[in-house]
Amino acid sequence: MKYVPQQTVAKDVMATGIGLHSGKPVRLRLCPAEPNTGIIFRRVDHPEAADIPVCAAAVTDTKLCTQLGDQTTGVSTVEHLLAALFALGIDNLRIEVDAPEVPIFDGSAAPFIFLLQTAGIALQEAPKKAYKVLREIRVEDGDKFAQLSPADGFSVDLIVDYNHPVIPHQQQRFTFVGRAFQDEIARARTFCFQKDLEMLQTKGLARGGGLDNAIVIKDYSILNPTDLRYPDEFLRHKVLDVVGDLYLGGHLILGAFSGRKTGHALNNKLLRTLLAEPSNYRLVELPADTDGLPYPTAA
């Protein structure tokens, strides 16, 4: 084989969890897909709903999570699952859900990685593709920014600054090779402030949110009975979001990401800006001798 092969799952795998915003059970099924299919979401509770291919243009809302498609037949809270697909190098997959959102599980990417590993990874006879960043791309919003620069691999350098006593100013750079995402990022949970959670729940949102699937922050403390999974878990979860949001391009990105106080909206704007101009990137097939892939490979 003269190229790095595309990958899918070896068999169907299914799990049930709670929707973050509805608070209702959601059934999720991950199914193999043919080479060059890409990643596709399917709402099985709406038989007439069109499949939603994962791409930057499919994003329709980024207020509280990343949503694909319309309010009636779309799917939201997709970023943690997409980060898990990045972590294992999945190129082709059909994702079936029977609700408007992907289950939140524990608020991290780790349960999705477990599901994918349970299904097994299947190599496919087609070359894996990647977006190679050719020039610096930057988007800004006040003091926030997100940027991609040319590089041979993929890395994330991120600054978080909430001006809050529980979340100190933090910055770290992560280079993703092999199991780096699984070991350093995957278990980082989403987080929220208690006052914001209570406000959202009065509006009928975040009904499934709680201490089982998020770090909940009060004025000067964390309400969860267990310790943080990483000393800088807040920063690492924001890195997880960056990875998931950028994987909405449908391929690996060969480039260095840097950002300050970025979120779903700015991440998606950066991805759209990258792909809007052909001179910004080149879609390449990865040769077999490619080093530093950001997911584990067979020996």
Image (cartoon, rainbow, N blue to C red):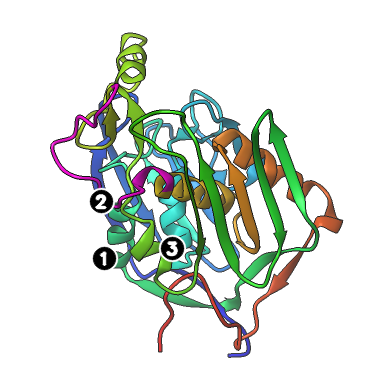
Q: Is residue 241 above or below residue 9?
A: above
Disc number for residue 118? 1
Sequence-earlier tag: 2 or 3: 3
The disc labelled 3 sits on which kind of residue? Ala
Q: Which mark is residue 229?
A: 2
Neighbour tally class for label 1: few under 14, some 14-19, many 20 plus, Cα within 10 Å: some
- N-term mark: 2 or 1: 1
Q: Of the residues tagged 1 and 3, which is closer to the observer?
A: 3
Range shown magenta: 219-235
Q: Is residue 289 magenta?
A: no
Residue 148 is left or right of residue 197, and the answer is right
Residue designated by label 3: 87
Q: Amino acid at mark 2?
A: Arg
Residue depicted at 55% across the width and 37% down the height: 261
Vertical position of residue 168 compared to residue 116: above or below: above
- Residue 282, quarter of the rendered image: bottom right
